[in-house]
Amino acid sequence: MESIPGRFGSPGGGPAGTPIVRPVHPLRPWLIGLIYWIALIPLTSPPRHSGNVWSRYMTIESLVERGTFAIGRSPLLKPSGSPDLARYGGRLYSDKPPVLAMAGALVYAPLYHWGGMRFAGPRGGFRRFPAVNLVLVSALVGLASAWSLVWVRRLLQVTSFRAWVADLLTLGVGFGTPLLTYGVTFNNHSVAAGLIAAAFGLVTLEDPARHRVARRRAWAGLFAGLAATIDLPAGGATFLVLGGWLAARQRRLPLAYLGGAIGPALLHGAAQWSISGSVLPVELDRAAMEYPGSYWASAAGRFHEAGPRWRFGLELLLGPQGWLTITPSFALAPLGLALAARRGPLRGAARAASALILALLGFYIWGVHRTDYAGLSFGVRHLLAIAPLVGWFALVGLDRVRRRRLGLAFALASAVGAGYAYEGMRDPWSRADRRPEPALRILQRLVLCPRSSYQR
């Protein structure tokens, strides 16, 4: 059984080959998260709109103001022009999983009932919309993004970085990756990032010699299960990978972990059943989305395969919108994963993370029906949910290989990532390769694979 001795153990020790768990004040990671959350708040205005955001906002508004998931009567429907809709029984719904919208409704309800604030006024005005958007984004997306950094900082306690260096590196993950780009707009991937980082951190930092192991596993199952209801590919893969890791550790079913996931699964199933009569996500029901008159049934919305999927995979990683193009510091993560997977107490974490990353890459390259799923978003936002985890292993690689040239290369890559993250934050719903900003034009000259198959 692998474990890291001492949840906040002394630098003195575990057995040979065990990384030091450097002690820090328990509130220090939370302070880093608080700094990041406060920094995101002013950046959240003005609101950043997209069909993706509108689709979820219409569900939130309909739940609170009319008590239904159906959005056909929402005053946001016509001005939004959102294509992210589905039809069941002649009624329109968002095609997004319902749990995040339900969480948003909990935030919106007191604003509407007690604060007199609403998305749209009785005559279609949007005077209070910026304030409502600010509260929703900060309370859900901003907090989840900050929470993911709390866990990155806690996980960095297994490295040899000095405390203040680890603090700065953690903030670098926040400000130099798509966590910043999407931390200012309403989206599910940022929320899933916080949940996945927490679930992975709880399992990685588990110490069987201490009490409350079952409770920690139950919380990990809750977070992973909730992530699966909000971001099915990333959260679902995380739930399976962590469950398999725990089962291999204890050589039996991780009952506490599985029990923690029951609540989110039942919540999603009940809500989805009330919409479609099935527990499956709406996005798996193409007939419901391609109803007559929908965008996806029109000529503009039809998809044509632009080439072999392996070439699309190269584009997904290194193209103008590529994962490593936008965040080049992540290129160090394979080194950290490989070194950690060889031996030591991070071996299980590295193998689990590798399986998670490969599963998601395989799904988004070969498993999806169409390769234009990112729409007009900035970068590969569908991989945002694992960005804190990948960023942590990039730092593990930097820690394991103490070379001056590697450090300088990482600093340069982080600076490029920060430039992309900042420009993306200004407009998260516009592609990097279709933007006129001088900074982006300069950065795009460094693209390793300039081909883009995106046609919408």
Image (cartoon, rainbow, N blue to C red):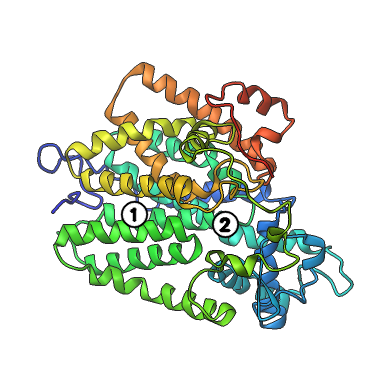
At mark 2, the secondary structure is helix
Which quarter of the figure is the C terminus placed in? top right
**Mark 1 residue type:** Phe
Few, some or many residues within 10 Å of mark 1 (<14, 14–19, 20+): many
The Cα atoms of the two marked residues, 1 and 2, are separated by 19 Å
Q: Where on the picture, by quarter, is residue 105?
A: bottom right
Between 223 and 252, the residue placed more toward the observer is: 252
The label shown at residue 141 is 2
Please state the horizontal and vertical placement of residue 279, each as a whole percent of the image: 48, 76
| Identity of the residue furthest to the top in this view | 405
Is residue 277 toward the left or the right of residue 51 in the image? left
Foreground pick, 115 / 417 = 417
Above or below, 202 relative to 212? above
Quarter in which the N terminus is drawn: bottom left
Q: Which mark is residue 330?
A: none
| Residue 161 visible in image | no
* Image height of 93 relative to 250, above or below: below
Q: Residue shown at 87%/66% (left/top)? A: 125
- Numbered circle sitting on residue 200: 1
- Amino acid type, residue under disc 2 in the picture: Val
Residue located 35% across and 53% down the image: 26
Q: Position of residue 392 (x, y in %)?
A: 38, 41
Return the x and y of residue 381 as percentages of the image width and height.
55, 47
Residue depicted at 84% across the width and 71% down the height: 121
Front-lying residue, 305 or 222: 305
* Residue 160 in the figure: left or right of residue 57: left
Disc 2 crowd, CA 10 A, few/some/many (<14, 14-19, 20+): many
